[in-house]
Amino acid sequence: IKTLLYPHQPYTGPYKGLFLFILWTHTILAIINFPLAVITLRYAFKGLFDKHKKIAPVTAFVWLYVAITGWMIYYFMQWLNK
């Protein structure tokens, strides 16, 4: 359904190298983000706070990076892809 609503649009703007770097790192970290969040929450709910404290900053950083780069990818595709 996604490809019917939003057909494939390759980025052809002036910052293609930067765009591809952001896209690849965003994709890889987005895949890693869900299991990392589940593990972090599991440690917290089980009361394993030492493990939770070690992994929570990493999880937060990955989540923040994926969120910010998601908006950047949208910006690249909608506003710089002319």
Image (cartoon, rainbow, N blue to C red):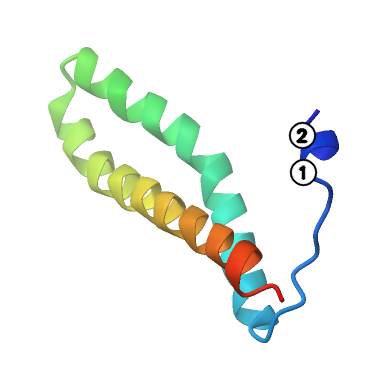
Determine the residue positioned at 22% across, 13% down. Answer: 46
Compared across the picture, whether 71 is left or right of 23 comes to: left
Percent from the top left, x then y, of residue 79?
59, 69
Compared across the picture, whether 31 is left or right of 48 comes to: right
> Toward the viewer: 33 or 6?
6
Determine the residue positioned at 81% across, 28% down. Answer: 1
Determine the residue positioned at 42% across, 35% down. Answer: 36
Q: Residues within 10 Å of mark 2 (few under 14, many from 20)?
A: few
> Toward the viewer: 6 or 17?
6
How many dots with numbers? 2
Three-letter code, disc 1 = Tyr
Cβ–Cβ below 8 Å for labels 2 and 1? yes
Quadrant that contains the C terminus: bottom right
Return the mark for residue 2.
Answer: 2
Determine the residue positioned at 77% across, 76% down. Answer: 12
Dividing the picture into quarters, in which one does residue 4 lie? top right
Which residue is label 1 attached to? 6
Return the mark for residue 52.
Answer: none
Three-letter code, disc 2 = Lys
Percent from the top left, x then y, of residue 32?
52, 42
Dividing the picture into quarters, in which one does residue 76 lie? bottom right
Residue positioned most to the top: 46
